Image (cartoon, grey):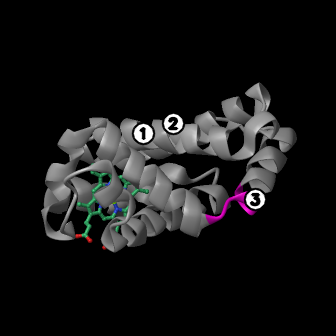
Amino acid sequence: MVEWSDSERKTVASLWGKINIGEIGPQSLARVLIVYPWTQRYFGAFGDLSNAAAILGNPKVSAHGKTVLTALDKAVKNMDNIKAVYAPLSQLHCEKLNVDPGNFTLLADCLTIILATTFGPAFTPAVQATWQKLLTLVVTALTSQYF
Ligand code: HEG
């Protein structure tokens, strides 16, 4: 079972408080779709994804990026219960959306890159390590209902 120190809890709360979901969410999802174009296959109903500019300007990508990042609030608020909190979302991605679970890691890494570029030196190695610890749990939890 993963343990969280008081300092890690404070780091997560502080970082999350500085994240603008409406900006970071869309940028992260757009980056996934641009850098890993095979992920576009899940978003056939989103309209024009034909190039980077189209993806970055696509309102459905922005809205969905915001939805995804909003869902991370559950992890921040339930750091000791992440697996249970994401079980329904894991089931949805597995059984209904048929998303290859390897894609969760791609999204998590793109999100981390966007945070690093947004916050610069404030995104210290210690903050990064704590943030990635959280994301690893989220990715694992989202994968939990696949098996
Ligand atoms: Mg998923 C829907 C969260 C990664 C593809 N995703 C959703 C929804 C949430 C969510 C909250 C809405 C669920 C609902 O309607 O009840 N997604 C979520 C998280 C993460 C993630 C938290 C990872 C951190 N999703 C993800 C990845 C892909 C993907 C990597 C594909 C590459 N998600 C996907 C699709 C939908 C959702 C295709 C349905 C979108 C729609 O039809 O509007």
Instruction: Name the residue that disc number 3 marks.
Output: 18
Q: Where is residue 4, by image quadrant? A: top right
Numbered range of the magenta stretch: 16-20
Residue most extreme to the top: 125
Residue at (83% x, 49% y) in the render: 10
Residue at (25% x, 50% y) in the render: 51
Rendering coords of residue 72 (x, y %): 54, 59
Q: Which of the two residues, 61 or 96, is positioned nearer the viewer here?
A: 61
Question: Which SS class for mark 2?
Answer: helix
Q: Is mark 2 within 8 Å of ligand 1?
A: no
Circles 1 and 2 in contact, beta carbons < 8 Å: yes
Rendering coords of residue 39 (x, y %): 23, 45
Is residue 31 shown to the viewer in this render? yes
Instruction: Name the residue that disc number 2 marks.
Output: 136
Residue at (47% x, 40% y) in the render: 110
Kindly report the secondary structure that dominates the magenta region of the rendered protein: helix
Amino acid type, mark 2: Thr
Label 2: few (<14), some or many (≥20) within 10 Å? some
